[in-house]
Amino acid sequence: MQNRPDAFFNLQSEVMKAVDHKTEAQPAALSNEEVQRYSRHLILPEVGMEGQLKLKAAKVLCIGAGGLGSPLAMYLAAAGVGTLGLVDFDVVDFTNLQRQILHSTSDVGRKKLDSAAETLAGINPQVEVRKFETRLTSANALDIFRQFDIVADGTDNFPTRYLVNDACVLTGKPNVYGSIFRFEGQASVFAAKDGPCYRCLYPEPPPPGLVPSCAEGGVLGILPGLVGVIQATETVKLILGAPREQSLIGRLLLVDAMGMKFRELKLKKNPQCPACGAHPTIRELIDYQEFCGVRAEEAPMTQMPAIEVEELKRRLDAGEDVLVLDVREPHEYQICNLAGHLIPLGDLPKRVHELDSSREIVAHCRSGKRSAEAVEFLRAAGFRKVWNLTGGILAWADRIDPKMPKY
Amino acid sequence: MRIHIPASLRQYADKKETVEVAGSTAGEALANLSSQYPALRRHLYNEDGKLRAFVNFYLNDEDIRYLQQENTPVKEGDSLSIVPSIAGGVPLQIGD
């Protein structure tokens, strides 16, 4: 907004603000350049001049400048949302580029916030981008949320998801929700006035052990595009004041990109909801890491019988009898492998007879999590000489064989 | 009746998208499903044999929590959807 050439309108809007407090947050008019830019909105009766001015006055906070945040922020900027806040502390890496279209190949290594702000300014220099280079925490969420009208949740983990929900409920900001897994997505609008919140839908998070691990991970790169654009659409409709029945408030939209099916389920506000119910027990933000059991899980992992990649390399080079057990999926084996014996973690119970318990076994996966489960399983099954390769094949690629591809 | 299996649980159900099961209530249908696919059980039920709080079950488009929970009657032609919470943007955050 600062760079607008037509100082007259800037001035005029400043004067209007000073004169009329009702329009304090609402610029009085669009410049000729803006009229041209938003002309396809202005001739749409459902937006029109009034709607475009609402968009311009609106302040939307995007949590995360990643897969969901990319299409979300880009379309909101293009649509003329006046102020866009971005919360992210990450750096662009090559694996992001398959879906995070805010960032380009030349941005690898840069802060996502810087790369995102540049892309958004390229789309629409009139948008004010506010960067919050931080992890969203219980200590800072309320202060950040209060500066905005709507929060769009593009986070990637359960602790932050519950934090965003509770902070939205506490500050009274609608939460435009999107979530993805492999080729399926969910979208809804939570914490709107009298509407259900995320805790009405899911009162508690899954224990970490039951969260699908990297074995089943991965995501179709286009899917966050689909879901993020749905979030952008809902955000714009909230700003325009679309009738409630037209919004996703009280509905959970399920997107299946593989079957290209959209289904919707009814969501009800839970009168007993601890966050938004009649007698809420959550009156302030809590420790969401603890709530989601993230910390609790780390402790037993450190007692896992483990071996470092350098030690494995030394023993293999010395010709020692060590069976390398790869518990990843066949499609991961194709990307890179240590010539190990492949038994995907999920198949281990029925294929355990393939392993000789008298031999020394080093189990590995991509990063060490699944193989830890495998080691636990094998130890419980009576195997005594089983070790987990710390850091998995990623550590091998980092420290032993730099030519090995990382994924 | 037909049960919709979400992508995150399909690996425990022979990669099937939908499974036809018998049963006169939602609880019976889910019990039949987990005896057909025992690996699914721990994802649907907790240690006390109760349906898990982070997995929702919808008879057609209604949450069974607001019907008669596991005793919700079901009939031929109904569909029951299993809808677990999913984390979002980057799937490796906690799982990996």
Image (cartoon, rainbow, N blue to C red):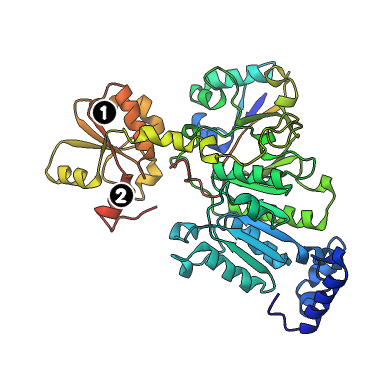
SS category of the residue bearing label 2: helix
- Residue B57: image location, x then y, percent: 66, 28
- Residue A79: image location, x then y, percent: 73, 65
Callout 2, which amino acid?
Answer: Ala
List the residue tagged with mark 2.
Answer: A395
Question: Would you call the spot at circle 1 few (<14 residues within 10 Å), some (14-19), or many (20 or more)?
Answer: some
Query: As rendered, which of A125 and A257 lies closer to the eye?
Result: A125
- Asked if the residue at tag 1 contacts the one at tag 2, i.e. Cβ–Cβ closer than 8 Å, the answer is no
Residue lying farthest left?
A318
- Residue A74: image location, x then y, percent: 64, 64
Which image quarter is the N terminus of chain B in? top right
In the rendered view, would you say A119 is above or below A185? Answer: below
In the rendered view, would you say A43 is above or below A389? Answer: below
Residue A384: name its quadrant: top left
Identify which residue is drawn at 32% across, 44% down: A392
> Sequence-wise, which precedes: disc 2 or disc 1?
1
User: What is the CA distance from the residue labelled 2 to the residue labelled 1?
Assistant: 24 Å
Identify which residue is drawn at 25% across, 31% down: A386
Res. A41 in view: yes
In the rendered view, would you say A35 is above or below A373? Answer: below
Question: Would you call the spot at circle 2 few (<14 residues within 10 Å), some (14-19), or many (20 or more)?
Answer: many
Task: Give the numbered dot on residue A161.
Answer: none
Report in which chain the residue with disc 1 lies: A
List the residue tagged with mark 1.
Answer: A355
- How many numbered discs? 2
- Is A262 on the left-hand or right-hand side of A365? right
